């Protein structure tokens, strides 16, 4: 059985843009869908948290720093065959004032953690798949998410090419989520149809990496 850890933010956690229910059911979320599509030879672990960043501490939402929690997740779920890193959207918040290149460097820190972590004598270093975020909706600055603005929306569009370059330099897989999915009515989170589209795009990439 191949074990996959999906480490991401609210779109990995399944936040529902319509708000009812607050979170999509497991079989609607992209993580649950890839589990169904991949079948019993794969074990998909969902580790998504709303507001999670790559390396930033959010003063308004504590305990969201991916760099701090990733080692615990790797220790908890080892041995692992693949780690999917799906972060970067929250790094575009105005309060961090980080440009796209800096955000990409933050993702590089997470890649380095996965590659250098001590998995123990009976475990191998897992492969890594980077997912660049979906784009934000055109009205994100007027949404309920007050820490996102027009500049945030422009930054997130720049991440795909930078993540792709990072993946090439570090030997990781890559998928641009914005090519297959987008936000729902709240300008930030995917609805069920977009979770389905992302899952269907991911499955052949995962199979290509793990066989």
Image (cartoon, rainbow, N blue to C red):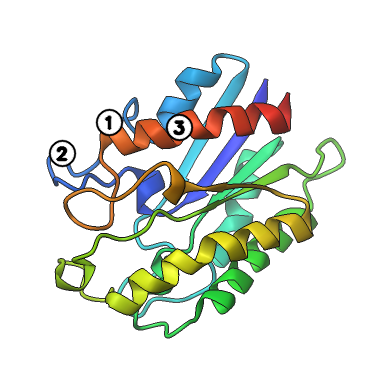
Q: Are marks 3 and 2 in contact (CB under 8 Å)?
A: no
Secondary-structure class at tag 2: loop
Residue 199, disc? 3
Image height of 168 relative to 173, above or below? below
Q: CA distance from mark 3 to mark 1?
A: 14 Å
Left or right, 99 with reference to 210: left
Secondary-structure class at tag 1: loop
- Of the pair 199 and 122, the residue shown nearer to us: 199
Q: Residue at x 73, y 42 (%)?
A: 127
From this viewpoint, is residue 72 visible?
A: yes
Residue 9: horizontal and vertical position, in percent?
41, 54
Q: Residue at x 22, y 44 (%)?
A: 16
- Of the pair 4 and 138, the residue shown nearer to us: 138
Residue 121: horizontal and vertical position, in percent?
87, 41
Residue tagged by mark 2? Answer: 21
Image height of 107 relative to 3, above or below? below
Residue tagged by mark 1? Answer: 25
Secondary-structure class at tag 3: helix
Q: Nearer the viewer, mark 3 or mark 2?
A: 3
């Amino acid at each position: 059985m191949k074990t996959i850890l999906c480490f991401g933010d609210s779109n990995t956690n399944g936040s529902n843009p319509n708000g009812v229910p607050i979170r999509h059911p497991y079989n609607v979320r992209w993580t649950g869908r890839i589990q169904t599509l991949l079948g019993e030879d794969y074990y998909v672990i969902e580790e998504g948290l709303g507001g999670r960043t790559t390396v930033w501490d959010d003063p308004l939402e504590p305990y969201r720093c991916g760099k701090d929690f990733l080692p615990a997740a790797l220790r908890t779920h080892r041995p692992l065959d693949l780690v999917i890193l799906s972060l970067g959207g929250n790094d575009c918040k105005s309060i961090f004032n980080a440009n796209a290149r800096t955000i990409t460097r933050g993702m590089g820190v997470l890649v380095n953690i996965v590659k250098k972590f001590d998995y123990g004598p009976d475990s191998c270093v897992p492969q890594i798949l980077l997912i660049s975020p979906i784009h934000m909706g055109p009205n994100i600055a007027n949404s309920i998410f007050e820490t996102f603005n027009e500049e945030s929306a422009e930054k997130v569009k720049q991440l795909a090419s930078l993540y792709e370059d990072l993946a090439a330099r570090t030997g990781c897989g890559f998928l641009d989520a914005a090519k297959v999915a987008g936000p729902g009515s709240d300008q930030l989170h995917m609805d069920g149809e977009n979770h389905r589209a992302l899952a269907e795009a991911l499955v052949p990439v995962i199979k290509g990496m793990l066989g």
